[in-house]
Image (cartoon, helix red, strand yellow):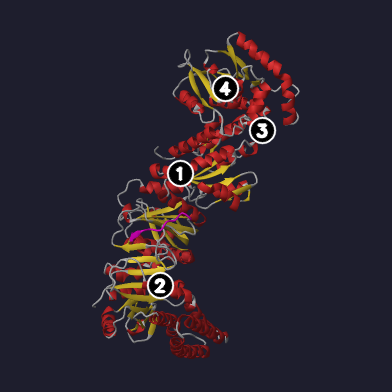
Amino acid sequence: MTKNWTVHKFGGSSLASADLYRRVGQTLGARPGMRKQDARKGVVVSAMGGVTNRLIELVDLARERDTAYRRRLDELRDFQFDTIDDLLPKSQAETLKSRLKDDFRDIEDVLRAIWLLGTAPHTALELVSGYGELWSAQVLAGFLGAKGESADWLDAREVLVVKDGELGPVIDWDATRPKLDRWLESREVEFLIITGFIASNEEGIPTTLGRNGSDFSASIFGALLEAEAIHIWTDVDGVMSANPRQVPDAEVLDALTYQEAMELAYFGAKVIHPSTMAPAVELEIPIYIRNTFKPEVPGTRIHLTAGEGSTVKGFATIDGMALVNVEGTGMIGVPGIAHRLFGALREAGVSVVMISQASSEHSICFAVPQSQARIVKDAVKRGFFAELHHGQIQTVDVTEHCSILAVVGDNMAGIPGLAAKFFGALGKAGVNIRAIAQGSSERNISVVVDQKDATRALRAAHSGFYLSNQTLSVGIIGPGNVGATLIDQLAEQVERLRDQYMIDIRVRGITGASEMVLEESSIDLDRWRDVLDADAQEADLDAFVDHVQTDYHPHAVLIDCTASGAISKRYADWLERGIHVVTPNKKANTSSIDFYRRLKAASRSNRLHYLYETTVGAGLPIIQTLRDLIETGDEILGIQGIFSGTLSYLFNSFDGERPFSQILAEAKEAGYTEPDPREDLSGMDVARKVVILAREMGMELELDDVEVEGLVPEGLEEGSVDDFMAALPDHDEQMTALLEEARAQGQVLRFVGAVDRDGHATVKLRRYDESHPFARIHLTDNIVQFRTRRYDENPLIVQGPGAGPEVTAGGIFADLLRLAAYVGATL
């Protein structure tokens, strides 16, 4: 042949309408990346989408003597003619329709004969079902010709000769090659449009290539034309790492080896069928799986090697399987048991999909299609009747409703720990493995699982390899001051964390009290407020949690940025179902001691993480410091500190020049206090922090056990905020007197929480010498003093800003990164 060839194959979904024919024409006429401008294109086509099924339906109707076949035949003719009229100039269209009218008359004659006979010979079915490809080829060749391209079409039945084989049609290469060479001798066209699916047998009778026949045709003609490449155009971007309908995070694979493609295709992945690849494999022709609707996407290359890439290439499942287990002491060490077993299955016409046998030889288990389970059981019982009768084989068990999950990759061989990673991912997802099989090539590890667990198993295995262990599916509850600031901080850092540390933080949900937004992949954090405004739906916390926790993300995290007691009561449930929790909300850890124990137990037993550093001291490392002291064997003698940024600010500003009520009003106006300042002045917020620290020390302290002396004047506990603020100046003299009394002793006033090792806990206004660390704080500083056996004479001090959304959000962010480190990140 004087010119190079590339072969392209377009399936029915790529040729389902006149517009799609135009798209195919554009793809063929200006495909980027052509190696040589003079390369000739062999284009194998299927019937238009749905046409083959409609032709087969006609045969079925005629066989059933249903006269509706005539109407359906007319409808099919009109459909084909409408397409031709849409694509071709009138004169050219009329010529082609005239040829097709002859085809429809022939089909009508065949259908009439079938109707009379009441039966449809196989040859008649194959003849009728192959017309769709004939029409597609002529229409596409005509369309290209009308556009000024040099194009002709080939009825593959004229050159392609096949024989019947045990596994399907077998190509007679010796008969086919000379026929094609003679056909091409007088034709110098740039576009050769070839009918897929159809061929002729040795007697010249029309036949088909069966399932995936058009793909097979592409491979055959790729070999016959010695093509540089074969491009299979379909409706997907390429071969996926898993079924995207089951695994939303499935990725398009850049490259596969022939062997990897065959393994995945066997398990139902959307890849060219193994038998159809054989001619291309023999001549080492690369095969590309491409998307007709996105010709700019390079697709997946299938060839001898796949180059650099993931160790594991893909995952696939086969549903509708049954697991058969043959077990007995009489099998141990007896030669020929396997031969007899699988011989019995062969005689019954059963294909075994997977086999597993332990080295003890005590049992053999294998997977078969569930539809054949009863046949298999009967065949095994007949084949081993004597052994069953004498008790040498005890059981022949069949477990139905199973699925096989396979992990595939040429580079899996010799990689330690890969199987452990696979099984570990299934274990973490709670999937029980019934049987395991791995060949010595190590290219495929297959497991049998219950069919009800198949999707969860597939998602878990895929995430274990394609998503790093540091991929976090995050839901943020409460986009208020702190929550909004946290989201903004994440927006600035998620890309850097992904690029530098492989920490993939995916905020997939944000919810407030009344509305929420959910995203399958990740919310665009740069414009999350716009997304919340535009796409919000009614808030539903249960649906929100279900969305955040998926089978295909390794870790789910809920971040509660509210102060809600109702939400905090759900932490234990979330931990128990496998969700990590991060929160600045103090309500959970200061609830009843029984609930606190349940929280801790849920975290430990499920190997999950419940992180709450910001419940004390905002972004300061107070809880972590306390844990470090305890875990290293130090003895805590007592803890005291200024735990309220608001009260720290108030007493730093209260110098006697202005009344206390005025300073409080200014702080409220600036947003330093709660909307109701009594929540700060009551001391209950500080009391909660004291309880949290006491419980970290191992004490079973309840909130009621803390002695609290708040600063809300007696009689002002109830009523509106405005009434409280209006009445507060009447109590300024009392606060001023306390300040003057302290100053007279060279002291300052500080609102302090404290707990000692005996469990005595207090929250009240105290005096400290001006030389004391508590006297030398600034603005909203928190300061905590740890007095321990090691730090007794010179206590350990932690000090820094303890209020404000920036520092609190920063502390939550730090907890989130700490979680990432716990699950495997290296920071």
Q: Which residue has dot 3 on it?
A: 675
| Residue at the (64%, 12%) spot, across then down | 740
Give the amino acid type for the residue marked by disc 3 in the picture.
Pro
Q: Is residue 780 visible from the viewing direction of this image? A: yes
Q: Which residue has dot 2 on it?
A: 26
Give the amino acid type for the residue marked by disc 4 in the picture.
Ile
Decide: marks 1, 3 in contact (CB < 8 A)?
Answer: no
Question: Please, is residue 461 above or below residue 613 in the view?
Answer: below
Q: Which of marks 1 and 2 is nearer the N terminus?
A: 2
Mark 2 crowdedness (10 Å alpha carbons): few <14, some 14-19, many ≥20? few
Q: Earlier in the sequence, mark 1 or mark 4?
A: 1
Q: Which of marks 1 and 3 is nearer the N terminus?
A: 1
Mark 3 crowdedness (10 Å alpha carbons): few <14, some 14-19, many ≥20? few
Question: Please, is residue 735 above or below residue 464 in the view?
Answer: above
Question: Please, is residue 395 above or below residue 648 in the view?
Answer: below
| Alpha carbon distance from label 4 to label 2 | 73 Å
Query: What x and y, as percent, mark residue 359?
Result: 34, 51
Q: Earlier in the sequence, mark 2 or mark 3?
A: 2
Q: Which residue has dot 4 on it?
A: 642
Front residue of this view, candidates 274 and 399: 274
Q: In this view, does 746 lie to the left or right of 490?
A: right
Give the amino acid type for the residue marked by disc 1 in the picture.
Val
